[in-house]
Image: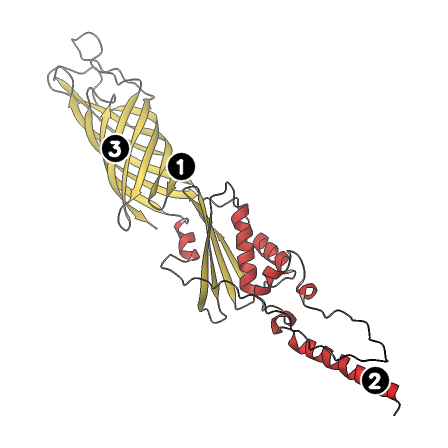
């Protein structure tokens, strides 16, 4: 065979060997599509303005450059975000197709909104699905990031230098291992804390302005969450009779109320709230010596505003304290036959302070 033909055959063999070795040397992960994943995303306390599940799935898919989420997938990634005491906290849990927890991660941020922590969560979920996602710019497809051998010009036929050994691409860096799961509740348990709850409490009260003098009494109250930070309240107030300054007659008050409350600042330890209530009941008089002009019970009504604080003690046990500003709507004038003037009339503005224990029902 002529010398030129030997060179041509040698050159063809070199090129075929380099291409074959280069293809074999590609990382297996770069040629395989990521396994479908089912994404569960829960927004917890004070996180209503953050992205929902479909938005987070779209952001992760954009990062990966392809859609990998499917509701029918057995492998799942669960995420949870909340804001407590001005701090964002997000937790991510990864489960295998058999439901086994293989890792979790917790992220936090002190930013004013949830955009920074959502960006970090997007990258963390993308890395859990495809560790190579950190090596590609956001939005690029995996196929575009796979190593491709550049086409090299053929050497002159007169001389065929030795074929260089193919260089395999550097292996992708291993993702940071997920920390071992801790004793913190899972996302579903955290989310259930924000679901409808009820509290029944028994309180001791001290009232001023409703009866002739400061009076101690009791009340029973119930709270039921309605939606988010709003909950309804109902209850009953009992103030036993107290005597007037002349000690010849006494007055007592029994009333029920209903209203709505809005939660303020708080966290896992408890929180504050502000309630507005409408009250309806009866004020009654007991005469010991003289003759009343209008005997029997008299209708009583009022409106109130109540700031209060609640602290979780042990288990479902709750401690409550607060004060109520009451404006009586029906200010009855009580008179006694044979005595000039008004024997008693409640104040235009009254106050009630209370403290007690409650039982929370999840």
Residue 302 spot, x, y in % from top left: 33, 25
132 or 290, nearer to the observer: 132
Residue projecting furthest to the bottom: 1
Q: Nearer the viewer, mark 3 or mark 1?
A: 1
Residue at the disc numbered 2: 7
Q: Residue at x 37, y 57 (%)?
A: 184
- Mark 1 / mark 2, whichever is N-terminal: 2
Find numbered disc 2 in the image and state the secondary structure of the residue it sits on: helix
Kindly report the distance in space between the C-alpha atoms of the residues bearing marks 3 and 2.
101 Å
| Residue 24 quadrant | bottom right
On-image quarter of the N terminus: bottom right
Q: Residue at x 59, y 52 (%)?
A: 55
Neighbours of disc 1 within 10 Å: few (<14), some (14-19), many (20+): some
Residue at the disc numbered 1: 264
Residue projecting furthest to the left: 289
Find numbered disc 1 in the image and state the secondary structure of the residue it sits on: strand
Confirm or deny contact between disc 1 and disc 2 (CB under 8 A). Answer: no
Q: From this viewpoint, is residue 52 visible? A: no
- Mark 3 / mark 2, whichever is N-terminal: 2
Horizontal side of residue 133 vs 6, given as left or right: left
Residue at the disc numbered 3: 354
Q: Which residue is drawn at 36% across and 31% down?
A: 277
Neighbours of disc 3 within 10 Å: few (<14), some (14-19), many (20+): many
Residue 127 spot, x, y in % from top left: 55, 61
Neighbours of disc 2 within 10 Å: few (<14), some (14-19), many (20+): some
- Mark 3 / mark 1, whichever is N-terminal: 1
204 or 344, nearer to the observer: 204
Residue 275 spot, x, y in % from top left: 37, 33
């Amino acid at each position: 065979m002529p010398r030129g033909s030997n060179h041509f055959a040698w050159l063809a063999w070199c090129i075929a060997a380099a291409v074959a070795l280069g293809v074999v040397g590609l990382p297996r992960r770069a040629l395989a599509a990521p396994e479908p994943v089912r994404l569960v995303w829960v927004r917890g306390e004070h996180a209503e303005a953050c992205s929902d599940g479909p938005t987070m799935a779209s952001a992760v898919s954009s990062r990966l450059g392809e859609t990998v989420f499917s509701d029918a997938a057995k492998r799942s990634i669960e995420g949870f975000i909340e804001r407590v005491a001005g701090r964002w906290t997000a937790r991510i849990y990864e489960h295998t197709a058999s439901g086994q927890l293989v890792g979790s991660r917790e992220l936090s941020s002190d930013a004013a909104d949830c955009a920074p922590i959502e960006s970090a969560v997007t990258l963390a979920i993308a890395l859990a699905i495809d560790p190579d996602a950190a090596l590609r710019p956001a939005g690029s497809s995996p196929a575009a990031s796979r190593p491709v051998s550049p086409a090299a010009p053929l050497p002159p036929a007169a001389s065929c230098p030795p074929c260089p050994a193919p260089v395999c691409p550097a292996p992708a860096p291993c993702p940071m291992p997920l920390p071992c799961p801790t004793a913190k509740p899972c996302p579903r348990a955290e989310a259930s804390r924000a679901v409808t709850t009820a509290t029944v409490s028994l309180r001791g009260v001290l009232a001023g302005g409703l009866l002739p003098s400061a009076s101690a009494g009791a009340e029973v109250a119930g709270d039921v969450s309605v939606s988010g930070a709003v909950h309804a309240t109902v209850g009953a107030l009992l103030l036993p009779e107290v005597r007037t300054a002349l000690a010849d007659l006494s007055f007592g008050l029994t009333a029920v109320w209903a209203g709505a409350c809005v939660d303020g600042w708080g966290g896992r330890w408890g929180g504050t709230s502000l309630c507005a209530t409408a009250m309806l009941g009866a004020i009654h008089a007991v005469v010991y010596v003289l003759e009343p002009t209008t005997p029997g019970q008299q209708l009583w009504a009022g409106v109130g505003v109540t700031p209060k604080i609640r602290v979780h003690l042990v288990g479902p046990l709750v401690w409550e304290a607060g004060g109520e500003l009451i404006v009586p709507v029906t200010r009855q004038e009580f008179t006694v036959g044979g005595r000039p003037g008004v024997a008693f009339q409640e104040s235009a503005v009254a106050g009630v302070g209370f403290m007690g224990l409650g039982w929370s029902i999840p």
